[in-house]
Image (tube, helix red, strand yellow):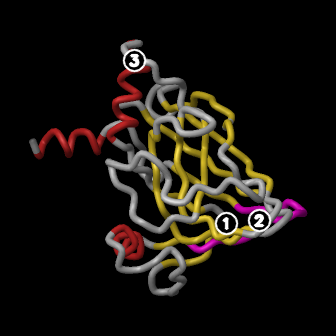
């Protein structure tokens, strides 16, 4: 049984496959705090919060890159999309939230999904890009035009504008956004 779990986790993802970029109202990059490997390890175990900005645990970067977590429901949804045995729609919606509980394979929603301030779940631009062989990676890109203030700490990919199946979710160091900012999120799923 343990081999199956390890095999599932090793497939359908790239290391550091989700990226976040924050731009101010003039289009200038705003540095964001990214936890290092040890900081991420602590965050995923709940020993620190996404609001921890200790310089021993990370640094400011122009582009934050993290790894995703594929949910059980997401893996089943992908299998359904491959052979048509099921009714899952395409996974093209990106949502963000303020939840701080570590992502788990049993997740079916974001912990605290945002639906205001220009940060509501929305359709991303979908394309295929090359990682190992031509067009082997599904890519989703969404630019959120922020109209309020929030501390974004989680994001996920869904197959519907509301409810739907959660393909992937992750929490991360808080990205503080304000009115006029643009938050660009890119998810990549490598099919191995």
Q: What separation in Å lies between label 2 and label 1 (alpha carbons)?
A: 6 Å
- Of mark 3 and mark 2, the one earlier in the sequence is 2
Residue drawn at 74 percent across, 51 percent down = 144
Is the C terminus in the top left, top right, bottom left or bottom right quadrant?
top left
Q: Which mark is residue 86?
A: 3
What is the total number of numbered labels drawn onto the structure image?
3
Dot 1 falls on a residue whose secondary structure is loop
Looking at the image, residue 37 sits to the left or right of residue 175; the answer is: left
Percent coordinates x, y for residue 69 in the rendering: 39, 49
Q: What separation in Å lies between label 3 and label 2 (alpha carbons)?
A: 42 Å
Residue drawn at 19 percent across, 44 percent down = 5
Magenta range is: 22-33
Residue behind mark 2: 29
Residue drawn at 52 percent across, 24 percent down = 89
Q: Where on the picture, by quarter, is residue 48?
A: bottom left
- Of mark 3 and mark 1, the one earlier in the sequence is 1
Compared with 99, 86 (above or below) is: above
Q: Residue furthest top?
A: 84
| Magenta-colored stretch includes residue 24 | yes
Q: Residue furthest right?
A: 26
């Amino acid at each position: 049984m343990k081999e199956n779990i390890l095999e599932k986790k090793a497939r359908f993802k790239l290391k550091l496959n989700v990226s976040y970029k924050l731009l101010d109202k003039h289009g200038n990059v705003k540095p964001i705090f990214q936890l290092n490997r040890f900081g991420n390890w602590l965050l995923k175990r709940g020993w620190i919060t996404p609001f921890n900005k200790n310089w021993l645990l990370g640094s400011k970067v122009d582009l934050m890159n993290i790894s995703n977590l594929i949910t059980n429901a997401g893996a089943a949804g992908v299998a359904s999309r491959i052979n048509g045995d099921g009714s899952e729609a395409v996974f093209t919606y990106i949502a963000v939230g303020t939840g701080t509980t570590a992502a788990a394979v049993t997740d079916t929603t974001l912990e605290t999904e945002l639906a205001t301030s220009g940060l509501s779940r929305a359709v991303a631009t979908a394309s295929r890009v090359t990682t190992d062989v031509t067009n082997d990676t599904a890519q989703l890109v969404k630019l959120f035009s922020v109209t309020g203030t929030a501390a974004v700490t989680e994001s996920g990919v869904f197959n519907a504008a509301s409810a739907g199946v959660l393909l992937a979710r992750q929490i991360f160091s808080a990205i503080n956004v304000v009115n006029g900012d643009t938050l660009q999120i890119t998810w990549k799923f490598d099919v191995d």
